[in-house]
Image (cartoon, helix red, strand yellow):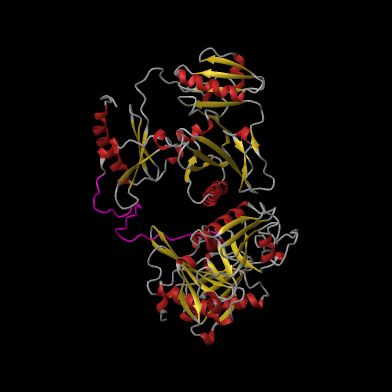
Amino acid sequence: MATDSAFAGAGKTAGLEAWRIEDLEPVAVPAAEQHKLHSGDSYIFLKTSEATTGLTWDIHFWLGKETSTDESGVAAYKTVELDDALGGVPVQHRECQGYESALFLSYFKATGLQYLEGGVASGFNEVKRDEYVTRLYRIKGKRTVRVEQVPLQSSSLTVDDAYVLDAGLELYLYAGKETNRLEKGKALEFISKTREARGGRANVTFIDEDPENAAFWDALGGYEAVSRSAESDERHENVVKKNTTVLRVSGSTDDNLQVADVTPSSGVLTKDILKTEDVFIIDVGNEVFVWVGKTASESERTNALTVAVHYLKKEGRPSHTPITRVVEEGETPVFTALFKAWTEPKVLEFGYQPSKGVAKMQDDKPVDVKAMVHAASQSEEDIGADLNGDGNHEVTVWRIEDLEKVEVPKEQYGHFYDGDSYIILHVVTPSSGKPTQVIYFWQGRSSTTDEKAASALLATFLDESLGGSPVQVRVTQGKEPAHFRALFNGTMIVHAGGKASAFTNRDDEDSYDTDGVSLYQVRGTNAKNTLAAQVDEKASSLTSGDCFVLVTPSKVYEWQGAGSSSAEREVASNIASILKKDRETEVVEEGNESDEFWEFLGGKDEYAKTKSSYEAPHEPRLFQCSNAYGYFDAHEIVNFAQDDLNTDDVFILDTYTTLYVWIGAGANEPERREAMALAQKYLAVAKSDGRGEGT
């Protein structure tokens, strides 16, 4: 079978390729446009993946709900053509608009699917600057969110989906009161990317902040109270399964194809049903599989999908029923799971050696060890020196709630929850000169992914609303720089819990400590850079080198570790005074704890002991070692925390008195070997800073 020139070079490298059927011919679709599908068209998608045995392929032909019979037929035929060009081994899938498979949808997790009206004739009209057609998009889905164009009218709105009104340089976001978090998050991302595509010139309006916005409702034909619910996101997840049917397709030419029902009377599928010289159609109710034997005739292979489609029509089944084509010895796990005791033959060629998964190395690029040692991390105090200097300081704090920013009452400034994300605007107005603006977005360690994404997007919107002049700084829990902590003048406290994520679950509730007992670890060297973080209220959380504040229903204890400094003890007193409210406080030195103190921590237990006398403090430094780019290299991670460790790489941790080499479980052999050698070289150079021979 001849191969269409449009498929030349297809499937050679990992990634996603797409073609649209135009004038009954496949035409390549640019990567940036692959998620935008026209309901009047048919498409072919090729997903190429890397495996230890080489490349693997999945071919999907996607049919719009308004596509013509000719176009859908060409898409099916050209899919077989592409399949043959790749040796006949790809897995084929038939996709219908609105009923796509989970595998197909997984390719668009970053962008979502965007359905557009029309077809080839209306799809790629010339676009002129600042000339836009007003459109309304619905953002809907539970697992993978789709963006679909809907009629431009207020009756299109529902209470449980998100919508974006695209009016060119004016963008509006409407979210129904029952919109789920993924839909809301995707709507924010969609609107952000739309603005980006227009050079950041489009204005964004959130309708929940201006529910009677005249321009929005006028574009939709007038205001209408929204009360209608859309059909369930899970409408296709509970398709009623029918009895299994097995059909055998055989014949050497198109004219003598025979279809026979070979369904086993027991209803149990065994591998010996399948014959290598034929094609089989297996209907399991919610999906149809087409299995192609290795020696099947060209006619059988070419017409297999057409036969499957005719079978669905004959049975009165929905046209969107998924059809997946697999080939012998290339069966998917989903397919083999249909059979009893499916076994795979393992054939190893002579001299076969399994791949170690190591990228091909480029010519040696030696790591500059001296630069590693002597290029000390930039001082936090230097970064924020101009921000914490003289002048008038104004701070505004917002918390992300239901993927929107909600201003925090001023009396709660400095109080953060590890399950939330926040946006902080700091404006410094010097006595002379122009104001300096900094936008921080702080992300709690337990904050949900959608809340973190919303904090970043909303920080960008805030930046642009202020003329694009502010500096944006991302701050993650545990990595707060000194200039950020100083904004709250020694009152920054991170509590456990937070607001429930936006519609993560309709039954979710806000999570806060409610038993009246909480333990805080205090960090800081002066009253300005103090930070206290809530830890598990148990004795093993204590460390001798730090101070802790234990809050109980009737009393607040200031626990002073034997190795803590006088500055740290003063800081702990400051935190205790904030947390005590109307409770009394009691200072407890390590070793003089009362029974009551231990009872609040669940009983006395072992905890970390640190030396009270140690060498002059040196900031620990962490270096990540990897050959992911084809050569071995190391780079420093500043303000690091445990979650910076990547199990695919090797890390060198310099604590001044000890040098650690941490090896991730997925690190390859060259990385392990090179990192150990680098650690030895690093240590030899590092001894010039005065550390002892015993390091």
Query: 83 or 47, which is in the foreground?
Result: 47
**In the image, is residue 450 above or below residue 613?**
below
Residue pushed farthest front? 432
Q: Residue at x 46, y 80 (%)?
A: 298
Is there any visible trace of residue 98 in the rendered image? no
Q: Is residue 456 magenta?
A: no
Which quarter of the rendering shows the N terminus? Answer: bottom left
Q: Position of residue 398 (x, y in %)?
A: 59, 42
Q: Is residue 358 magenta?
A: yes
**In the image, is residue 8 above or below residue 429?**
below
Q: Residue at x 29, y 47 (%)?
A: 632
Q: Position of residue 432 (x, y in %)?
A: 46, 38
218 on left or right of 480: right
Residue pushed farthest bottom? 255
**In the image, is residue 148 above or below residue 360?**
below
What stretch of residues is rendered in magenta? 339-366
Q: Quadrant of residue 114?
A: bottom right
